[in-house]
Image (cartoon, rainbow, N blue to C red):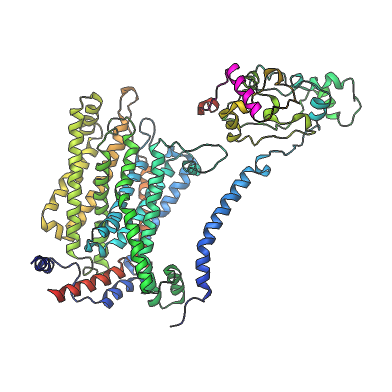
């Protein structure tokens, strides 16, 4: 009776045992890498805006306070996107002929809002409130990254639930004095010192490590 | 002296193999069913019906995924009805296969030889049907993997305190072990088919599946060892899987669910319904393929006795359930039982008692146990009874619990029935393909049975 399979079938069948395990492992790693990649999360990806507004210039170089534009951050869940009028407080006086700012002036003339692209948007099933975070010593840059270094705005975090939970589980690692919340240049003390400060602030500000599902998913 | 007696016993005991069989004849008889080209009219007819039902299942699933579980009759308070009933019923069916293949192997019960292969296949297909239902019952079935603990960007584990998560582990373990056990058992038979096959395609397919089996002493010793190990792993599953399934109910506080008797009661019920299903499949199979020599009247007799024994355990559980409802002094428990017996679903309850308790009493008679036709009817009735039992436990308990204000009725829609019918389609499509393409009786074990029978003849 002739052989059904070639001799190489012996090797192939043995190799396929290890091969299957390796393949499944690689597939898992690949899936994880895709899930965490900027391509999927938009982390670190600068978004196109109707006007190339630079936080680096306004918040960093000029030192305009965050709250000058994001007025409702201390009172409301939503930090607020400024109306064109806010831009025009300065730009009716300076750079009045700039080509780049024409859409802003057009918006002011026609009373049509500029339609900015949201960069840090959470899904609708997540309840998030800026005011409580700001009131408990979570700085703007803790979540939004080094805004003062961003010529165009991008997401500093993945906005995954794990990213939220990182702080909710160990707030002492991230919290800062209330006086520093709006300081875009604040540098947290390194390592053990931050933990020491953090623990003190957690006690002083009565910060609770809220991890119940219904805290955010109401 | 002892020895003589034992030999005498064997000589007296009815054989579990028809007379005149040799190593070659059993192999030829079983393998010819698979290797004869083409299909018989009977097979084709049955397969066509199965495929139609399977297509119905596909229609149901498409409609279900598009419109959600609202197409079924479920609503608060009866949020669990047909789908969960079917799940428990199908998974219960599987238990007989595992009991026969693993537990009886460890117990050296040789009569299992001719029925274990297709009983195991039945287990695997039944678990597939069962596993489908919780997924269909999910609001968003495409997120079923949330039930598995895997590294994820939500930093969330499943709720390990929930019996529904235990279920996922119990059922997936059960499926994996059953499949492995079945496949390992098939390997020498696949090699036989490879060697006997005429066409190149069958040779390659059976050859690849036989994984290079040459029947050397090393192969046999490893085969035996692997079978024994897998039997050791599978045996606890006979008890554990349905125990975990029963936790889905006992962990909740609903009267009619919250009961400590459930685990043993469910396991007995599972084996009861499983053996009923084995008989439902075995009786037509042996008739159609003329396998009366291999699946003898004695086999049917033994299986009927197992059914009777487990049926009595189930009956005892019904009795205890009723007794405890009154003994508990809890008005909710008492009401639950009275509602079952006299409430709007009383027909279902008494149907269950008739099917599971009264009619199976006919199995005390040797005449019934020896008559394939009568046994087939009883087995079918028990299958129906066990389905009704799960419906009684699950849905009737839910429809009237603590607050009369939220009482409501559950009526199955046509989609409920179509899903149930469709699951039969899936099961029988797989089963028909199995009997066409794989040996439905283990040739290897039958050959060793022939050998042992010969030896015994020499010694007597």
Does residue A199 belong to the magenta stretch? yes
In this orientation, which residue lies closer to the viewer: A207 or A110?
A207
**Residue located at (68% from left, 42% from top):** A38
Above or below — where is A1 with respect to B266?
below
Above or below — where is A208 with respect to B204?
above
Q: Residue furthest front?
A: A192
- Give the magenta-colored segment's residue range: A192-211
Q: Is residue B88 visible?
A: yes
Above or below — where is A180 with respect to B229?
above
Q: Position of residue B139 (x, y in %)?
A: 46, 38
Count of number-bearing discs: 0
Q: Is residue B72 visible?
A: no
Q: Position of residue B124 (x, y in %)?
A: 36, 55
**Residue located at (31% from left, 23% from top):** B404
State left or right for residue B411 relative to residue A193: left
Task: Give the main secondary structure, helix, strand or loop, of the magenta stretch.
Answer: helix
State left or right for residue B326 relative to residue B105: left
State left or right for residue B310 relative to residue A204: left
State left or right for residue B56 relative to residue B66: left
Q: Position of residue B39 (x, y in %)?
A: 36, 70
In this orientation, which residue lies closer to the viewer: B219 or B451?
B219
In this orientation, which residue lies closer to the viewer: A93 or B262?
B262
**Residue located at (38% from left, 36% from top):** B74
């Amino acid at each position: 009776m002739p052989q059904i399979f070639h001799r190489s079938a012996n090797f192939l069948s043995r190799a396929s045992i290890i091969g299957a395990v390796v393949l499944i492992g690689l597939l898992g790693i690949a899936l994880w890498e895709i899930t965490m990649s900027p391509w999927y999360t938009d982390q670190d990806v600068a978004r196109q805006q109707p006007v190339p507004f630079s936080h680096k210039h306004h918040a960093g170089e000029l030192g305009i306070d965050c709250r000058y534009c994001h007025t409702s951050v201390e009172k409301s869940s939503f930090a607020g996107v400024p109306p064109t009028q806010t831009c025009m407080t300065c730009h009716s006086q300076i750079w009045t002929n700039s080509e780049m700012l024409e859409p802003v002036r057009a918006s002011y003339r026609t009373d049509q809002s500029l339609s900015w692209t949201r960069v840090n948007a959470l899904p609708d099933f997540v309840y998030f409130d800026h005011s409580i975070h700001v009131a408990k010593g979570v700085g703007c840059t803790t979540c939004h990254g080094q805004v003062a270094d961003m010529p165009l705005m991008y997401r500093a975090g993945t906005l995954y639930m794990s990213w939220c939970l990182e702080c909710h589980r160990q707030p002492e690692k991230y919290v800062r004095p209330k006086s520093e919340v709006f300081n875009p240049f604040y540098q947290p003390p390194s390592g053990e010192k931050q933990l020491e400060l953090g623990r003190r602030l957690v006690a002083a500000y009565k910060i609770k490590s809220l991890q119940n599902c219904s805290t955010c998913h109401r | 002296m002892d020895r003589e007696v034992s030999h005498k016993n064997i000589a007296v005991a009815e054989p579990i193999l028809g007379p005149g069989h040799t190593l070659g004849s059993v192999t030829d008889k079983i393998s010819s069913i698979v290797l004869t080209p083409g299909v018989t009219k009977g097979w084709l007819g049955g397969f066509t019906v199965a495929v139609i039902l399977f297509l119905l299942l596909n229609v149901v699933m498409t409609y279900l995924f598009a419109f959600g579980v609202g197409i079924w009759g479920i609503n608060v308070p009866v949020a669990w009805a047909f789908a969960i009933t079917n799940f428990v019923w199908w998974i219960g069916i599987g238990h007989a296969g595992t009991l026969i293949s693993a537990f009886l192997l460890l117990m050296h019960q040789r009569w299992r030889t001719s029925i274990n292969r297709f009983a195991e296949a039945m287990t695997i297909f039944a678990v597939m049907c069962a596993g489908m239902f919780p997924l269909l019952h999910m609001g968003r079935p495409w997120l079923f993997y949330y039930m598995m603990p895997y590294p994820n960007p939500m930093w969330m584990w499943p709720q390990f305190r929930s019996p529904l998560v235990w279920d996922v582990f119990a059922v997936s373990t059960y499926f994996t072990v059953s499949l492995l056990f079945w496949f390992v058992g098939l390997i020498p038979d696949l090699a036989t088919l490879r060697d006997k096959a005429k066409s190149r395609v069958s040779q390659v397919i059976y050859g690849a599946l036989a994984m290079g089996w040459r029947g050397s002493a090393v192969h046999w010793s490893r085969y035996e060892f692997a079978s024994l190990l897998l039997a050791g792993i599978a045996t606890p599953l006979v008890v554990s899987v349905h125990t975990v399934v029963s936790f889905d109910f006992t962990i909740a506080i609903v009267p009619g669910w919250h009961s400590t008797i459930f685990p043993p009661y469910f396991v007995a019920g599972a084996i009861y319904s499983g053996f009923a299903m084995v008989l439902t499949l075995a009786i037509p199979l042996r008739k159609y393929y003329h396998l009366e020599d291999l699946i003898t009247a004695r086999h049917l007799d033994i299986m009927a006795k197992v059914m009777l024994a487990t049926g009595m355990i189930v009956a005892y559980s019904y009795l205890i359930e009723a007794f405890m409802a009154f003994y508990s002094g809890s008005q909710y428990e008492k009401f639950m039982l009275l509602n079952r017996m006299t409430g709007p679903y009383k027909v279902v309850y008494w149907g269950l008692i008739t099917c599971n308790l009264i009619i199976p009493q006919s199995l005390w008679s040797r005449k019934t146990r020896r008559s394939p036709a009568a046994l087939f009817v009883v087995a079918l009735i028990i299958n129906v009874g066990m389905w009704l039992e799960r419906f009684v436990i699950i849905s009737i308990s839910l429809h009237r619990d603590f607050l009369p204000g939220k009482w409501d009725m559950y009526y199955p829609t046509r989609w409920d029935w179509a899903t149930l019918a469709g699951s039969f389609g899936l099961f029988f499509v797989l089963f028909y393909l199995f009997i066409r393409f794989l040996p439905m009786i283990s040739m290897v074990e039958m050959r060793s049975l022939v050998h042992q029978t010969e030896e015994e003849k020499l010694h007597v």
